[in-house]
Image: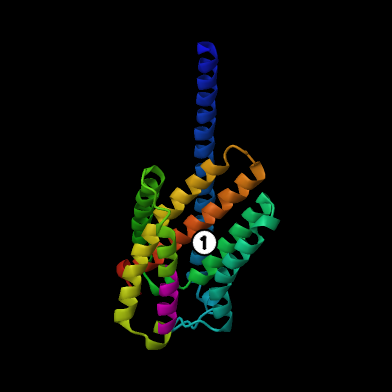
Amino acid sequence: MAEHDTIRRTGAGVRTTEIDEGLRAHMNKVYGTMSVGLLLTAGVAWSVGSNPALLSLLRNPTTLSPNILGYVVMFAPLIMVFAFGAMINRLSAAGAQLFFYTFAALMGLSLSWIFAAYTGLSIAQTFLVTSISFAGLSLWGYTTKKDISGWGSFLIMGVIGLLVASVVNIFLASPAIMFAISAIGVLIFAGLTAYDTQKIKTMYLQHAHSMDQEWLGKSAIMGALNLYLDFINLFMFMLQFMGNRN
């Protein structure tokens, strides 16, 4: 009996080690895919935003107001996010990854105007601060023993509220409302960074026993997309505070 108990404990220990190693590999893939997406977005945004001729295809060179094509590029990433959620089950892992990188490049086009509106130094400083903040928040979400799954509905409601307020402020153009939106936006996406990180970890642990490589691959891409969106939104809201206008 003692020998059987020892074998069972040894087997459980080996299985736990395999799951821990798999989780680390899974999270590395999530962060790696997200990082490549961010680099792609930054490269496209800088290439277009620092070229007045290219930027003029999307926005007025003086006011930076978007033209028709600019509005299409602005809202296309939002449409792609919803499409990705609807199509994820029909895509292969490789197809999901290609979709994500296409989305990241398009997001770079939609954000290219910031290189004409803000100084390069302030953009770099904001990116650095966002990176440090994001890393700390994501690490906390990964390591905390506290279950923060209950934050989800509250944070999603907050995102919807931000979208509504942003649309309303397009017509009001109120600096006070914009300041409030930016401040609340930083808090909401800070919370989402920790929440999404814990969710990615939890989902892996719930499905680790099946070791479905196709599911794991697509799950990593979806996790990378969620964290990518958290980072981009956190960066854009912080840029409202830290960015110096040209």
Depth check: give the residue in front, 180 or 60.
180
Disc 1 crowd, CA 10 A, few/some/many (<14, 14-19, 20+): many
Tell which of 183 and 3 is nearer to you.
3
**Residue 130: horizontal and vertical position, in percent?**
36, 57
Where does the C terminus fall, quadrant-wise?
bottom left
Q: Residue sitting at 33 percent across and 57 percent down? A: 129
Q: Is residue 160 magenta?
A: yes
Who is closer to the viewer here, 237 or 201? 201
**Farthest bottom residue?**
171
Residue at image location 37% in from the left, 87% down from the top: 172
Instruction: Report the side of 114 relative to 83 (left or right).
Output: left
Residue marked by disc 1:
41
Up-down: is 47 above or below 26?
A: below
| Residue closer to the observer: 235 or 204 | 204
Residue 242 visible in the picture = yes
- Residue 153 in the image: x percent, y percent? 44, 63
Q: Position of residue 194 (x, y in %)?
A: 40, 53
> Image height check: is 138 above or below 105?
above
Res 57 visible: no
Q: Main secondary structure of the magenta part?
A: helix
165, above or below 129, in the image: below
Where disc 1 sits, the SS reads helix
Instruction: Give the magenta range.
Output: 159-168
Numbered disc total: 1
184 above or below 178?
above
Whether 34 is among the magenta residues is no
**Residue at 52%, 66% in the rendered image:** 108
Please state which amino acid type lies under the numbered disc 1: Thr
Q: Residue at horizontal 66%, vertical 61%? A: 87
| Image spot of residue 41 (x, y percent) | 52, 61
